Amino acid sequence: MALIAIGQNRKMEDYLESVRRAGGEPVEIVVGVEAPEQILSRVDGLMLTGGGDVDPKLYGEQPHDTFQAAETGRDEFEIALARVAIQKGLPLLAICRGMQVLNVAMGGTLVQDIPSEITGALQHSVPQPRAASAHEVWVSRGSKLQALLEDHMDDGETCHVNSRHHQAVKDVAKGFTVTGTSPDGVIEAMEKPDAPYCVAVQWHPENFWRTGEFRELFEGLVQAANSRKKK
Ligand code: MN
């Protein structure tokens, strides 16, 4: 069974359950216990999870008033995890903060506060219910994301997602492609086309395991992890 390392999170249950239902075995990782290289040498895939804001110093900016740091050590540790995973071609699914970490790790920048920086922005902070639809995402034709979510989209390119973030990807890291945007222009998904599986989404697909919506994102990760394991 494919082992999927899952980054530290205050609310692990939905992440764990989503991986299990996709046929993978989750391995919870804790900041600072083991080196990123060591952890990733014994798993078949990686999932980066949600959480607080990435320190803007890490992409060369001063913090906005709304800055809320993640748990101590998570930024550096997860950036290292992301870089090692990309370098090894390890299957990676990055969720919410995970997508922001991945982007910063690979040289991109972030919108620090959507309401203050994006005129006419939609409401992206909809805490409850966790699996409610908050806004649309327009998915790029021909992307891995579109292939994964095809069955969920009536017109083949629009899906409805939940939303609990005040930050977003701004300058996309080199080598990555934007694969989903909300109607206000906020980047909601990106991927690395030349990687076996490197998919990032700004919403929270892990909250939908009860209904199975977005399960393909986790199944894609586990399948890619299994194929890698067989090699
Ligand atoms: Mn959103």
Image (cartoon, rainbow, N blue to C red):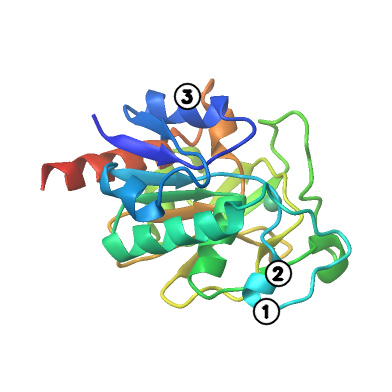
In this rendering, position of residue 1 left or right of residue 181? left
Residue at image mark 2: 56
The tag earlier along the polypeptide, 3 or 2, is 3
Question: For the residues marked 1 and 3, what is the alpha-carbon distance in whole angstroms?
Answer: 36 Å
- Are discs 2 and 1 less than 8 Å apart at CB? yes
Q: Residue at x 36, y 57 (%)?
A: 85
In this rendering, position of residue 70 left or right of residue 26? right
Question: For the residues marked 2 and 1, what is the alpha-carbon distance in whole angstroms?
Answer: 6 Å
In this rendering, position of residue 131 left or right of residue 147? right
Q: Residue at x 39, y 33 (%)?
A: 27
The image shows residue 114 at horizontal and vertical percentages of 79, 62
Quadrant of residue 188 within the rendered picture: bottom right
Nearer-the-camera pick, 46 or 58: 58
| Placement of the N terminus among the 4 image quadrants | top left
Q: Is residue 170 visible?
A: no
The image shows residue 143 at horizontal and vertical percentages of 40, 60
Q: Which mark is residue 17?
A: 3
Quadrant of residue 3 within the rendered picture: top left
**Dot 3, crowdedness within 10 Å: few (<14), some or many (≥20)?**
some
The image shows residue 92 at horizontal and vertical percentages of 39, 51
Residue at image mark 1: 60
Amino acid type for the residue under numbered disc 3: Glu
